[in-house]
Amino acid sequence: MLKTPSKRLDNVMSKQPRQKKCKSCGVKFTPARPLQSTCSIPCAIDMARTIRARKERKDHREAKQKAKTLTEWLDDAQAWVNRYIRLRDANEPCISCGTTNQNIQYAAGHYRTRKAASHLRFNHDNLHKQCNNYCNQQLSGNIVNYRPALIRKIGIERVEAIENDNIIKRWTIEDAKEIIAEHKRLIKELQKVVDE
């Protein structure tokens, strides 16, 4: 015998609603309404506050991003590039002095400084792992020892290409955003390789 539409509707209406997990406190409950996501009014109020706070944080973050200057964007991009360089060269010694001491802080040291050649500040051939306190800060990059090690690492042709590169580059906010996105992707890929 075929069920008529009214009988089917009666079967659907007679079913008990499935239990749900409260999105606020995590307790299982039987909802009184189809779209109910919390077990009680206090949990609903708590969830509404959480959603509002999350939206305010997002709006604040977006407003902060819009208010950033070019210098702040370039500094953020430099931080992501430096993080990638330190991860890329994690198993290598300091490019200048050759130390492998694990108890000191390392930086991404520029062969040609950011002030002397700002167009090369994000160039991977111009950046290598360097001990932060001694070579990078006290010896201003320790360039005397940097060059021979750099030649051994990447070859004389690429070192001379860095030394002879004197183009003028005007960085933009869009450039900085692209550099940040690219290096986030590179770091993620490198982390996968390191974790395997």
Image (cartoon, grey):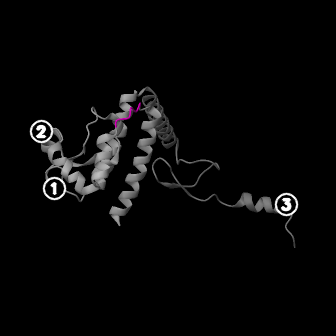
**Mark 2 residue crowding within 10 angstroms, few (<14) / some (14–19) / many (20+):** few
Earlier along the polypeptide chain: callout 1 or callout 3?
A: 3
| Tag 1 residue | 102
Q: Is residue 161 above or below residue 89?
A: above
Residues drawn in magenta: 166-170
Q: Amino acid at mark 3?
A: Pro
Other residues around mark 1 within 10 Å, as few (<14) / some (14–19) / many (≥20): few
Q: Mark 3 vs mark 2: give the one in front.
A: 2
Magenta highlight on residue 2: no
Of mark 3 and mark 2, the one earlier in the sequence is 3
**Amino acid type assigned to the residue bearing label 1 in the image:** Gln
For mark 1, give the secondary structure. Answer: loop
Q: What count of labels does the image hold? A: 3
* Residue identifier under label 2: 138
User: How far apart are the two marked residues, 1 and 3, measured between alpha carbons?
Assistant: 75 Å
- Badge 3 marks a residue whose secondary structure is helix
Q: Is residue 28 shown left or right of residue 145?
A: right
Circles 1, 2 touching at the beta carbon (< 8 Å): no
- Which residue sits at x=36%, y=58%? 191
Secondary structure of the residue carrying tag 2 is helix
**Amino acid on which the number 2 mark rests in the picture:** Gln
- In the picture, the quarter occupied by the C terminus is bottom left
| Magenta segment includes 168 | yes
* N-terminal label among 1 and 2: 1
Specify few, some or many for label 3: CA neighbours under 10 Å numbering under 14, 14-19, or 20 or more: few
Reading the image, the residue beneath label 3 is 5
Magenta: main secondary structure equals loop
Q: Is residue 123 visible?
A: yes
Choose mark 1 or mark 3, whichever is in front.
Answer: 1
Q: Quadrant of the N terminus?
A: bottom right
- In the image, 35 versus 109, the foreground residue is 109
